[in-house]
Image: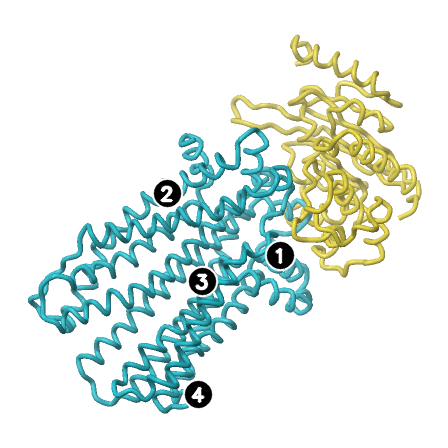
Chain colours: A cyan, B yellow
Amino acid sequence: MIGLALRSLSARRTAFTATFASIFFGTLLIGSFATLLETSFTDMAQVDQDTLFIMGAVVGSWGTIIVLFSLASTLGIAVRQRDVEIALLRTIGASPGQARRMIRIETFLVAVVASGLGAAAAWLGGRALFTMIRNGGMVADTVDYAGGPASLGISMLAVVATSLVSATIAGRKATSGPATIALTDGTAGNQPMRWWRALAAVLLIGYGLTMAVITITVTAHSDDPYDAMATSGSSSILVSAGLACIAPLLLRWSATLLRPVVGRAGSTGHLAAHNTSRRAPLLAGVLAPVMVFTSASIGTLMLAGIDGRTLAESTPETDTITMLNNVVIGIISLFAAIMVVNSFAAVVAHRRGELARLRLLGATPEQVRGSVVAEAAIVAAVGVTFGALASLATIVPFGIARHEGIVPDGQLWLPPLLAVVAVAITLASAAVAVRRSTARQPLAVAGAGQ
Amino acid sequence: MNSQPLNSQPALSVHQLTRSYGDPDNPVRALDGIDLAIPTGTFTAVMGPSGSGKSTFLNCAAGLERPDGGRVLIGGEDVTDWSESQRTKLRRDRIGIVFQDFHLMPYLTAEQNVALPRRLAGGRSDKHLVRELLTRVGLGERAGHLPGQLSGGQQQRVAIARALVSQPAVLLADEPTGALDSTSAREILTLMRHSVDQWGQTVVMVTHDPVAASYADSVMFLVDGRVAGRMTQPTADAVASQMAHLDDLVSSGVAS
């Protein structure tokens, strides 16, 4: 089984590079903040301890939610795309359990190596983060970095466990039906959405909106101005993570609505509109990070803007919080961008055979590239729209709490700018991914993706 | 589309076609100077042992591969030196291809798959023609189904309707029944025979199955990249014994 798993890994390098990259960067992100948390448990002044603890625990846990979530979606793509191969294994006598075990072993091998390297990088990353905090004067010079095996080990464990759980769930889905059904081409992406996704979405969105309401009704009247930030700050991330859970549904509805409009854009638009609506679960893996990126960046930066305008005097505490916000947004954006690039590479790599097929039928390379970029445009438009909506869960309550009203007083140029960035990342990653797969002659590729 | 006017021009002809693979010092000659003309409105089967060059022949005729030497003429027009983009246009305007693995787009319905070549060509898809083609191949009721909801034989019939939508000069079929059970295979072969007899279509089919070849007007045998014989009014038995004879020739090394 391990031999089969190893060979199957080397046969699908692109998809596994994508998995590897998301596990590596995920561990790096979680691990870096975990070392701050570990450092905060060493002997130091109470105020320094608080700073490090808030940074490590609060920021780290937001990051962790996003990382674990996107990890699950990348692995979901990687496994779901293999339905034909898994069906093939089962027709020659592999039991569903054996097929699932192969998927788990593969995932485990990739996860251990990638998270190990990620943890090593996090040890350096955490140190760099800590040095930045100390040089910024937010903790005393006497405090030393104390990140080590405990925090990095726990981060690794969390990432490997998440990978295994999502591979198991995806594997169960891929092996649930009779083996013969999956052998017919193109069932990938047609499965109905699972009930627990809807449940998770309701919980996350409900939690985010509750925090928004609490901000307006309770913490807005609190003596400490940061209470309102504490309750509303994560709302945009929570709501967008909830929307990400039902991304397949959002994409199917939106793409179906957009079909008549996009269909006017010639054959490329026609192909793109049908692919996004009929195989929404595949592209939903790209839609999810686009929504989270848009929502988290708009929400957090507008929050920081409102905070800067309404609190006149600058204290060490405000400095820390401003920096915290910037670090959060920087890291989350970077991670979301990596996820977008990653998932597009995984989705397009799987479709090499299908895209070559279009060329055999008389599509020019430009038409093939155009249809994939048009899909990206649909995903970007849907993602930016819902992401911007989700960001309101932070902006509106915090604006009210700080007496700026529903519409903030400044920085209104920021949301359109970030939306443009999100669209640009999505389109560029699609263009890069598809250029690689149309570079070769169609005949050489057409058989490969079957 | 009904019975094209009789044309003295062959639908497809090749002259001295050569194609080699591998390193230049020790090339493998897949095609070694093939000459043939396929008259318009006929059904021709191309047969040969493995490695005889029949797939390479089809790929060169479809413009998927460029021959090393010789000429390819589609409907009297020399397309040998056409650029990649010209050959792309050729594939969607003048040639219909049917593949062993159907090659339907999984996220498009039967109707949309049939209309696809016209859409790629930039034209508006003729809904009426698409519907009529689907009705002709016996799938009028299933126009809205996705390929995943159709059987293999039904998918191949959609693929044939798609190949016919451009009203091509020639329909090239590469082992069209290779992935089908014998009942579905018979239906597909009858359909192709029908397209020649009733609609005046020209069909060239690569196959290794003597029963499939017996549906053709004539069979052309290839061995080691050369034309090694021809049979008109083929029967499955005659084709099978000829194939066995050719296999013997190849294994004893006489033909090479």
Q: Nearer the viewer, residue A371 or A25?
A: A25
Q: Which residue is mark 1?
A: A275
Kindly tell me whether residue B44 is visible in this rendering. yes
Q: Which mark is residue A66?
A: none
Q: Nearer the viewer, residue A85 or B188?
A: A85
Residue A257 relative to residue A76: left or right: right
Q: Is residue A106 above or below residue A193?
A: above
Name which quarter of the figure residue B21 lies in.
Answer: top right
Whichever of labels 2 and 1 marks the residue nearer the N terminus, that label is 2
**Mark 2 Cα within 10 Å, few/some/many (few <14, many 20+)?**
many
Whichever of labels 1 and 4 marks the residue nearer the N terminus, that label is 1
Do the residues marked 3 and 2 share a common chain? yes
At horizontal 36% and vertical 63% (from top left) the residue drawn is A334
Q: Secondary structure at mark 3?
A: helix
Marks 1/3: CA–CA distance: 19 Å
Q: Which residue is mark 3?
A: A289
Q: Which residue is mark 4?
A: A406
Marks 2/1: CA–CA distance: 30 Å
Do the residues marked 2 and 4 share a common chain? yes
| Disc 3 to disc 2: CB gap under 8 Å | no
Residue B227: x and y in percent read: 75, 22
Q: Secondary structure at mark 2?
A: helix
Q: Which residue is farthest top?
A: B252
